[in-house]
């Protein structure tokens, strides 16, 4: 049985549906991230689970216990906010003691639990400091210590790293997952940062406009998503519109603005959307021995990214696409204006039926 079960949950405000019949199962010990653009409903969903908000309809269960109508303090859930929500008049130890004290535990047990949680987040030596004396990363660690100090069965994290510097976020996001796994907690982590979510999660929940678009393992949703929106939201991709010409055992032949593209056998309608991530676009010089086919074009722009080089390509068929090449590959020697041949890694080409409406609206993260 799932540890967390959300069934048909909706939340409405005047002129806005924040959640639209959302259903989701999360299993014991999972670290799940809910991601999506601002205003998609991810924080609203988290607050409904926590009891900060009550849904207009639907059911929420944790450990098979129905939570609708149960006050937040009786749900045995730890909540970590983006803005820390620490008590400024309390020192580090007193903040860490707050959860166990509210539960009515003995003073000895409270001290033991506070020391253990502060040791976990490496803040025990700062026990006498106040929140305003700590760095942003240390304050968020203290917020985590306070949340896990009451021994919750479920940990909710609402954009916990959103206000921190990039270098601090990188280390702390891995620390969050490590602690949750060591403590055997089920964690639901809300973020709009795709890289953050993919690096720490067992599964991702992708949301848009109050609905769940897709759920799956990070690598599956990145490499082989079922939805166009997921493809676009989880990382850069080149999108092209094509038409199916023929289908056979050797593959499906597509026409893309006068160019031919063959993809592995699959069922496709006449009008399709093709997507390929930049790292699966290879560029070579015209006439190179290893190049037997491809699309001609020129380098329009070149950007150094540290571990890779990003190229923007103007193709002869009028398309502009992006390629991303590791520094270890000799193709990074290309310069703006150079003629190239672009090839696509065939098993990484994604295809989708063309949406009934506008493609830009389907891709939109706004």
Image (tube, grey):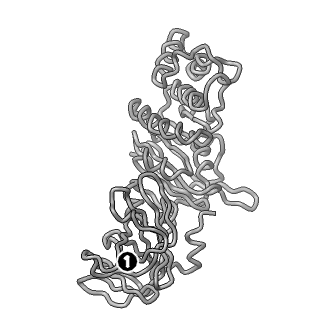
Badge 1 crowding class, 10 Å Cα cut-off, few under 14, some 14 to 19, many 20 or more, is: many
From the viewer's perspective, is 366 left or right of 4? right
Residue receiving disc 1: 341
Residue found at x 44% / y 72%? 275
Image quadrant assignment for residue 350: bottom left
- Which quadrant: the N terminus? top left
Tell me the quarter of the image containing the C terminus: bottom right
The residue at the point 40 percent across, 76 percent down is 340
Give percent across and percent down for residue 360. 59, 74
Seen from the viewer's position, the closer of residues 297 and 203 is 297
213 shown above or below 350: above
- In the image, 133 versus 234, the foreground residue is 133
Q: Determine the residue located farthest toward the top in the rendered image.
A: 108
Q: Nearer the viewer, residue 89 or 12?
A: 89
Q: Where residue 103 sits: x, y (%)?
A: 57, 21
Tell me the SS state at disc 1.
Answer: strand
Q: Residue at x 51, y 72 (%)?
A: 300
């Amino acid at each position: 049985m799932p540890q967390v079960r959300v069934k048909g949950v909706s939340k409405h405000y005047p002129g806005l549906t924040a959640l639209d019949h959302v259903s989701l199962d999360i299993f014991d010990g999972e670290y799940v991230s809910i991601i999506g653009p601002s205003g998609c409903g991810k924080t609203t969903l988290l607050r409904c689970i926590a009891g900060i908000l009550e849904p207009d309809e639907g059911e929420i269960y944790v450990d098979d216990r129905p939570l609708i109508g149960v006050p937040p303090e009786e749900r045995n859930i730890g909540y970590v906010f983006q803005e820390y929500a620490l008590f400024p008049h309390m020192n580090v130890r007193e903040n860490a003691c707050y959860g166990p004290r509210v539960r009515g535990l003995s003073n000895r047990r409270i001290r033991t639990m506070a020391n253990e949680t502060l040791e976990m987040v490496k803040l025990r030596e700062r026990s006498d400091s106040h929140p305003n004396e700590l760095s942003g990363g240390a304050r968020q660690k203290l917020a985590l210590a306070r949340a896990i100090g009451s021994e919750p069965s479920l940990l909710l994290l609402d954009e916990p790293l959103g206000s921190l510097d990039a270098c601090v976020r990188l280390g702390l996001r891995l620390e969050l997952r490590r602690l949750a796994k060591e403590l055997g907690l089920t964690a639901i982590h809300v973020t709009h940062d795709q890289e953050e979510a993919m690096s720490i999660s067992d599964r991702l929940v992708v949301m848009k406009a109050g609905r769940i678009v897709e759920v799956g393992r990070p690598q599956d949703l990145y490499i082989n998503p079922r939805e166009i929106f997921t493809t676009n939201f989880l990382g850069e991709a080149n999108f092209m519109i094509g038409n199916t010409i023929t289908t056979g055992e050797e593959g499906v032949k597509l026409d893309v603005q006068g160019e031919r593209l063959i993809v592995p056998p699959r069922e496709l309608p006449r009008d399709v959307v093709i997507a390929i991530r930049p790292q699966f676009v290879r560029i070579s010089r015209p006439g190179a021995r290893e190049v037997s086919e491809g699309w001609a074009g020129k380098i329009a722009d070149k950007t150094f990214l540290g571990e890779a080089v990003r190229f923007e390509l103007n193709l002869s068929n009028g398309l502009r696409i992006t390629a991303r090449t590791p520094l270890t590959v000799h193709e990074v020697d290309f310069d703006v204006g150079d003629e190239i041949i672009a090839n696509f890694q065939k098993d990484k080409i994604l295809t989708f039926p063309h949406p009934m409406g506008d493609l830009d609206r389907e891709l939109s993260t706004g």
